[in-house]
Image (cartoon, rainbow, N blue to C red):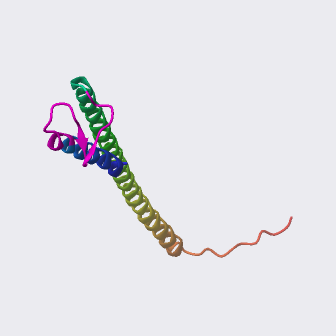
Amino acid sequence: MIILGLVVTLAAIAAAVAVILGNTGEVHVTAFGHEVPGVTEQWHLFLAGVVVAIVFMAGAGIAALGFRRSMNIRRELRDLRDEHEESLQTLELERRKLQQALAQARRGLDEQPSVPAQRVAPN
């Protein structure tokens, strides 16, 4: 989208430069070595300038929208990466705590004296 906007903007700039440099007469408009049909009066030339300006603004707008969208996507991905990293760190800390608790519980079972089982005589 950014590339499309830049291409449209560059095309508008090229058209404007061609019209300005190629027109030394009063009302004959040429662009890229060809006469532009339908432009015979001064207001036609002004209208052509308006069209070029609109195309330029559209191209710049498309490029700006694409740039903003790209920046938003990058920011969202960075936030998701940071959130994922925090989540992994929290899970790792919890795993270590559980491993320590398990080790303590196992040590506690090993240290208890074994009591022989007693049989109860039937009555």
Looking at the image, which residue is at 30% across and 32% down? 51
Q: Is residue 40 above or below residue 4?
A: above
Measured as percent of width and height from the top left, residue 60 is found at: 28, 40
In the orientation shown, which residue stands out farthest toward the right? 123
Position of residue 97 relative to residue 52, above or below, is: below
- The answer to if 29 sits in the magenta stretch is yes
Which residue sits at x=43%, y=67%? Answer: 100
Name the residue nearer the viewer: 111 or 15: 15
Residue 121 percent location from the top left of the image: 81, 69
Q: Is residue 71 visible?
A: no
Residue pictured at 85% horizontal, 67% vertical? 122
Towards the viewer: 113 or 20: 20
Q: Is residue 42 magenta?
A: no
The magenta stretch spans which residues? 19-40
With 50 as the anchor, is 111 left or right in this view?
Answer: right
Number of numbered labels in the structure image: 0
Which quarter shows the C terminus?
bottom right
Instruction: Give the quarter of the image for residue 59.
Output: top left
The location of residue 97, given as percent across then percent down, is: 42, 62
